[in-house]
Image (cartoon, rainbow, N blue to C red):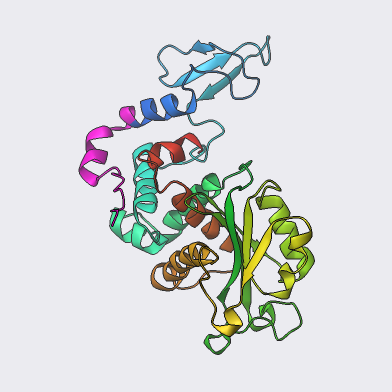
C-alpha cells in the first residue's frame, strides 16, 4: 500500500529563525511581491528611486512627473495603514495556514496576546480576503460536483430543501457548491439555492467542457448537465455510494474538513462572512502539496 507523501511546512522554530526581526519581514515581503525588482504599484514603472534615509520607501516620477508618487513595501497590500508590525501579520498567517482546519480569531488573540479580540478578528478577515483564489483554471479530468449545508437547526441537518429547490435556506442554512478534480484542486462557492440554473451556473464557472467525466449524485438540479458534459451519477437515496470509479468521496472529504472546522474551531459563522471562510479552506486544500504555502500566501497579500 502506497504511503501518502508528507509535505513539510514551516515550523515555529523555523519561522522564528527566518523572521527574527521586522527588517527580515520587510525584505521577505519585497522579495515575494517584486521578485523581478521593485516597480511602482500605481503605474508599473520599473526601478523607482529609493529614498535615502527612509528604508523600504521609493519614489516614482513616471506617475506624476512634477510631484512624483511615493510608496512603500506595504502600499496596496492588506498590511497598509496598519499599526501592527509585519512580524505579527506573518505569525497570524502562519498559524492560519499550518492549522489543517484553521484557527479562530479568539485563539489567535489569546496565543499572540493582542490588545483586543477585534484586532485579531480584523487581521484574520483581511488575510482571508487575500487568500481568495481568482482567475483559477477550470477543472478538467475526472471532476466530482456536490453541495453541502452550513448552519441552521440541528434537526434539519439532513434536509435538502422540502422539495422546493431552496436547499434548506428557509431553516437558516447556507448552501455551498463544490467541484473537485481527482487528486487536484477544488472550487467552492456559497450559492443562493439548489435550483438547476444556480448549480449549472456554478458548474459552467468551475468545470471545463473538456472534462473527461463529471460525477454528481442524482439531485434534480444536475439533470441537464449530461447535455454539455460526459455526466454520470451515484444514487445516494438507494445507498449507492461507490460504483467502480464512480463516486463523490473526494468532494465529501473536503466537506468534512469544512464542517469539522466550522463546528470544532469557529463554532458559529454568519452568512455574511461565510464566503471568506470557504475561501480559506479552499486555499489550504489547493496548496496541500505546496511546501511553501506561506510564501504563496504572502505573495498574494
Count all numbered tags in the image, as a single digit.
0
The residue shown at (40%, 14%) is 53
Q: From the viewer's perspective, is 293 left or right of 216?
A: left
Vertically, is 39 above or below 251? Answer: above
Please report the residue visible at 58 percent of the width from the left and 86 percent of the height from the top: 156
In x, y percent, where is residue 149? 58, 73
Q: Residue furthest front?
A: 244
Image quarter in which the N terminus is found: bottom left
Q: Position of residue 140 (x, y in %)?
A: 61, 47
Q: Up-down: is 188 above or below 15?
A: below
Q: Is residue 273 visible?
A: no
Work out whether residue 251 can be spotted: yes
Residue 67, quarter of the rendered image: top right
The foreground one among 243 and 136 is 243
Give the residue at x 63% y 55%. Answer: 213
Residue 79 falls left or right of residue 66: left
Whole-percent x, y for residue 190 in the image: 63, 63
Q: Which residues are magenta?
A: 1-24
Residue 244: x %, y % from top left: 51, 66
Q: Image check: 250 left or right of 170?
A: left
| 277 horizontally vs 235: left or right | left
In this rendering, the answer to whether 140 lies above or below 156 is: above
Looking at the image, residue 174 lies above or below residue 63? below
Return the residue nearer the eye: 10 or 206.
206
Instruction: Out of 109 and 95, give the one closest to the viewer.
Output: 95
Whether the magenta-drawn stretch holds residue 236 is answered as no
Amino acid at each position: 500500500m502506497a504511503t501518502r507523501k508528507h509535505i513539510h511546512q514551516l515550523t515555529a522554530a523555523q519561522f522564528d529563525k527566518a523572521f527574527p526581526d521586522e527588517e527580515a519581514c520587510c525584505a521577505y515581503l519585497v522579495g515575494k511581491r517584486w521578485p523581478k525588482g521593485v516597480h511602482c504599484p500605481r503605474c508599473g514603472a520599473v526601478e523607482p528611486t529609493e529614498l535615502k534615509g527612509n528604508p523600504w520607501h521609493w519614489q516614482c516620477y513616471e506617475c506624476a512627473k512634477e510631484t512624483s508618487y511615493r510608496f512603500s513595501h506595504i502600499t496596496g497590500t492588506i498590511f497598509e495603514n496598519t499599526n501592527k508590525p509585519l512580524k505579527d501579520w506573518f505569525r497570524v498567517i502562519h498559524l492560519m495556514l499550518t492549522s489543517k482546519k484553521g484557527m479562530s480569531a479568539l485563539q489567535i488573540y489569546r496565543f499572540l496576546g493582542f490588545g483586543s479580540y477585534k484586532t485579531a478578528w480584523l487581521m484574520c478577515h483581511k488575510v482571508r480576503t487575500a487568500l481568495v483564489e481568482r482567475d483559477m483554471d477550470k477543472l478538467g479530468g475526472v471532476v466530482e460536483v456536490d453541495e453541502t449545508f452550513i448552519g441552521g437547526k440541528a434537526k434539519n441537518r439532513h434536509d435538502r430543501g422540502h422539495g422546493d429547490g431552496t436547499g434548506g435556506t428557509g431553516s437558516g442554512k447556507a448552501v455551498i457548491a463544490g467541484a473537485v478534480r481527482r487528486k487536484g484542486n477544488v472550487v467552492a462557492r456559497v450559492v443562493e439555492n439548489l435550483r438547476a440554473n444556480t448549480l449549472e451556473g456554478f458548474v459552467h464557472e468551475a468545470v471545463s467542457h473538456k472534462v473527461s467525466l463529471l460525477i454528481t449524485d442524482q439531485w434534480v438540479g444536475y439533470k441537464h448537465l449530461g447535455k454539455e458534459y460526459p455526466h454520470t451519477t451515484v444514487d445516494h437515496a438507494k445507498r449507492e455510494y461507490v460504483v467502480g470509479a464512480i463516486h463523490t468521496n473526494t468532494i465529501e472529504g473536503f466537506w468534512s474538513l469544512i464542517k469539522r472546522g466550522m463546528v470544532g474551531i469557529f463554532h458559529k459563522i454568519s452568512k455574511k462572512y461565510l464566503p471568506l471562510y470557504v475561501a480559506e479552506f479552499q486555499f489550504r486544500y489547493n496548496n496541500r502539496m505546496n511546501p511553501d504555502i506561506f510564501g504563496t500566501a504572502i505573495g498574494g497579500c
